[in-house]
Amino acid sequence: MKAFEPDRIRNVVLVGPPGSGKTSLAEAMLYRSGALARAGRVEDGSTVCDHEPEEKEAGHSLTTALATLEWHDHKVNLLDTPGTFDFAGEAVGAMSAADLAVFVVDASSGLDHATIDLWRQAADRDLPRMVFVNKLDREHTDFEAVLAELQKAFGAGVAPLEIPIGEAESFHGIADLLTDTAWIYDSGQAELGQIPEEMEEREHQIHDSLVENIVVADDGLLERFLEGDVPSFEELEKVLGRGVAAGTVFPVVCGSATIPIAVDRLCNYIVEVGPSPSDRSPIPVTVGGSTVEVEPDPSADALVQVFKTAVDPYLGHVSYFRVLAGTVSRDLQLTNARTGDDERFRNVMSLQGSESVGVDSLMAGDVGAVAKLSGTLTGDTLSASGRAEAPAIGFPSPVLSMAVRARSRNDEDKLANALHRIVEEDPVLTVTRNDETHQTLLGGLGETHLRHVVARLERKFNVQVDTQDVLVAYRETITAPSSAEGKYKKQSGGHGQFGIAWVRVEPLPAGDGFEFVDEITGGVIPRQFIPAVETGIIEAMAHGGTSGYPVVDVRAAVFDGKHHAVDSSEMSFKMAGRLGFQEALAGARPVVLEPVSAVEVTIPSECLGDVMGDLSSRRAAVQGSDLDRWGDQVITAMVPESEMLRYSIDLRSITGGRGRFIAVHDHYAQVPGGVDVPPPPEG
């Protein structure tokens, strides 16, 4: 494939809920362009974009796929994304590499909350948008109702460019509102036809409204229009393109991906009114502490950002990247801004799903892939002119955790490496080790996401794991001072063991940890044995208090003791310190502490009462609520971590999938009376 200039490139991300037909649409576009000799089917597992075994089994996308086509001397990079929230990280990464988001809406089910949420994410990124109303050949479709939903949800900028001719099985063409013409697909190809008489009045009405809305954006055209001069199609299209690039106009087109009807029209609009990389705002790049505005100039120093990473069974570590500036070619050496290390692009590829095609070069604005970058992760920026860093992609944070344990000793040996590699693939996924609960935790966006990770561990890395419920890392502290004698005396032939240490404990402010004080005078405990007393106390704190959980926020002082000239040793005073602390702890009114998270919950206003009631049942201390830019309620609260373990699942149920939240550990607090605390984990 030849290299394309930035103004001839269109980077398009297909977004929408599961089942809307994104993958089928990508397949139809590839087929119509000639990139495929025959269109595959999602049901058969034969599409270009759904190439992972789990995707074929599930019947919908789980990862972002890249496919490329040529249309009217333009290169179109298609990014087909998953539609479920559990894989929102894939859609976010793809949006960062795109210049246009095509929202695929099922005409039979209409607009849903997932589409609205994705639209808002695109708007927050200033990403131009258009809509393809799909599946008009299905029963129970109503284009006018879907259009009304779109306009109500997304405002006056929603502009229909087509309306369907026929419904359900009789759907066979579209009326082009810009040109007042009909395109009929009875032969399988677009042929110029007649707008049915029963549609003419409605078509002319929408056409006139569309033209009026377009000319308002251009003073010259508006003046001519008011004087009775109707602008040409080319003039209207040019102004429309400027509105799309500015994010003020959102064209709506329609068709069916599976027949296919009007898919070629969508391709036309993508290259005619869709923005090129050159039409977008410059990218603010940080270089040496200063910000530089970077344009997609092919002659500049090369600058790329990795937006996705995959592990391919044949190619190994594959990095998907967008060329922000310059030209990328084989054997180019770039510097990773995060690590400072140099990376060599030994090959440059264009992808068709799982198939790779080597290319000589990719110009600014283009999207491609490279294999075997040793230290580069998703989100990294690489530059030919030193350490230059593009804005962070902004992936979502995990909302649900799952504990995993290797099933066998053989699996245990491979698990750490497999988890490291799978985190490189998925920037949303986190892997942490909780030393207090002795669990390895996977953090993700939902049960489906985490189950998919477990399946990939087995399929890609041959590692089998068992899953467990997440344990809460409780702790203990004291609320009163106390002191006690720790005596360790043992005689078993030869030298014995003897050590006595008096230990006093006092509570410290929350978060201060541990403080050890040496108050020994007169040499009752020799100097060399004092550290052993401290070690014994620290071991006792880690072993657990009266409830078995680690003890924190304590000042411990050793203030008296006895030793023996022959039988005393470091071991005997370590045991004396441990025993003295345990005795003193019992009289210091110990209490159990639980971790508390700062939580921010975003929900539709009509769900406020139900969500507030649910938070109250979780012992939440609600701090307030406010409205965000979209009119949703944002609740802030402090909630015990033990009450949040399954909150992502419950919140989706309460809000019909429309709620979301973030939770960050904030502090530890005393467990109230009447709340059961489970026994600590073994081991």
Image (cartoon, helix red, strand yellow):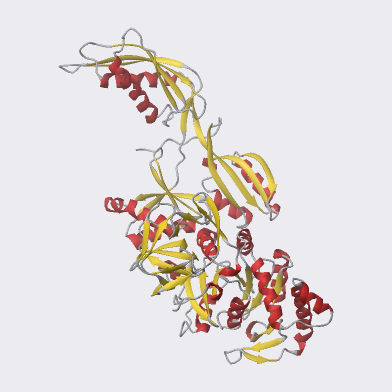
Residue 172 vertical position relative to residue 132 in the rendered view, above or below? below
Camera-side residue: 434 or 124? Answer: 124
Looking at the image, residue 510 sits to the left or right of residue 218; the answer is left
- Give the total of numbered labels: 0
Quarter occupied by the C terminus = top left
* Quarter holding residue 204: bottom right
Looking at the image, residue 597 sits to the left or right of residue 381; the answer is right
Looking at the image, residue 215 sits to the left or right of residue 392; the answer is right
Q: Residue furthest top?
A: 522
What residue sits 66% from the left and 66% below the top?
A: 246
Camera-side residue: 455 or 521? Answer: 521
Q: Residue furthest right?
A: 227
Residue 361 vertical position relative to residue 665 in the rendered view, above or below? below
x and y, in percent, of residue 106 in the image: 62, 72
Camera-side residue: 192 or 215? Answer: 215
Camera-side residue: 194 or 269? Answer: 269
x and y, in percent, of residue 533 in the image: 33, 20
x and y, in percent, of residue 74 in the image: 53, 79
Q: Residue furthest front?
A: 299
What residue sits 75% from the left and 76% below the top?
A: 210
x and y, in percent, of residue 25 in the image: 55, 76
Q: Can residue 651 be seen in the rendering of this structure?
A: yes
* Quarter holding residue 386: bottom left
Looking at the image, residue 372 sits to the left or right of residue 171; the answer is left
Residue 53 vertical position relative to residue 32 in the rendered view, above or below? above
Q: Can residue 212 be seen in the rendering of this structure?
A: no
Quarter occupied by the N terminus = bottom left
